Image: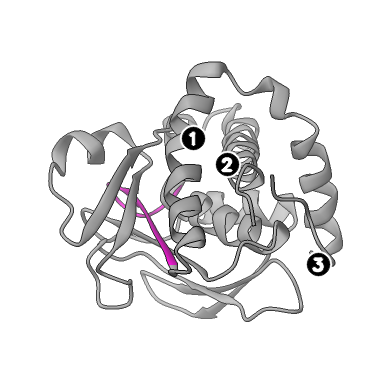
Amino acid sequence: MSTEKNVTLLPALQFTVNELTREFHEIPPERKEILKELTQFIQKNVENKQPVYLNFICTHNSRRSHLSQLWAQAAAYYYSVPNVSCFSGGTEATAFNPRAVKAMQEAGFAIVKSAEDTNPIYNVKYTLEAPGIKAFSKKYDDPFNHNKDFAAVMTCSHADENCPLVLGATARIALTYDDPKNFDDTPQESAKYTERVRQIGREILYAFSQVKV
């Protein structure tokens, strides 16, 4: 199993990670079976000394796919899993939703808007020791993403059902999550975004913790 090495996450993020790694027992067995598919894809590439490319896909690339991508890149760093590059995309492009941005900031990620637009570009950091992640909404096959020999991780059931073929993917994993968008502009909005950020973080951290490096 991977164990965290001499890495330095941003302090607020480290606090959240400490909480989530103590909650692995809360992940239901059926979810752990799905997460095992992600672990196995990563493990195989690590053992073969091949780079690990993960593309997290949902319909609009606005919420769940971004949350998963950012957590996965942070988890790879935290557990010292080498040569992992994480991307996200949609079946269409919209924008990284500001509610999701805020929830990830509250979890401890440092996120700064670096370009103003209807589809803003954000710079995301989980540590001062690694380059920031350029986050913006795009289609899954956008040239910005790595487009061959990757695992397509489907984070919403709509994309999973309506995108039967993901070109370039060598693995497909249906790791779907409920959409916090359903609670936009309701009294539950903030709590539901926090809940989804923590669920995704907990599960992605668990998957990476099972990789032997």
Q: State the mark number for residue 207.
A: 2
Q: Residues within 10 Å of mark 3 (few under 14, many from 20)?
A: few
**At numbered mark 2, what does the secondary structure look like: helix, strand or loop?**
helix
Q: CA distance from mark 1 to mark 3?
A: 25 Å
Residue at 55 percent across and 17 percent down: it is 29
Q: Amino acid at mark 3?
A: Val
Residue 180 visible: no
Q: Earlier in the sequence, mark 1 or mark 3?
A: 3
Q: Which residues are magenta?
A: 52-63
Locate residue 39, reporting x and y percent: 50, 44
Q: Are marks 2 and 1 in contact (CB under 8 Å)?
A: yes
Asked whether the beta carbons under mark 2 and mark 3 sit within 8 Å of each other, the answer is no
Indicate which disc, 2 or 1, sits on the residue closer to the N terminus: 1
| Residue 95 is at least partly visible in this image | yes
Task: Tell me the kind of residue under disc 1.
Answer: Lys
In the rendered view, does 177 fall on the left or right side of 27? left
Q: Is residue 152 above or below residue 145?
A: above
Image coordinates of residue 76 in percent, x first then y, are: 61, 59
For this orientation, the residue located farthest to the top is 29
112 to the left or right of 121: right
Classify mark 2: residues with Cα within 10 Å, few (<14), some (14-19) or many (20+): many
Across and down, in percent, residue 21 comes to 76, 38
Label 1 SS: helix
Residue beneath disc 3: 7
Q: Earlier in the sequence, mark 2 or mark 3?
A: 3
Marks counted in the figure total 3
Give the labeled residue for mark 1.
Answer: 36
Is 57 a magenta residue?
yes
- The location of residue 146, given as percent across then percent down, is 32, 72
Q: Is residue 125 left or right of residue 18?
A: left
Residue at mark 2 to residue at mark 1: CA–CA distance: 7 Å
The Cα–Cα distance between marks 2 and 3, rounded to whole angstroms, is 18 Å
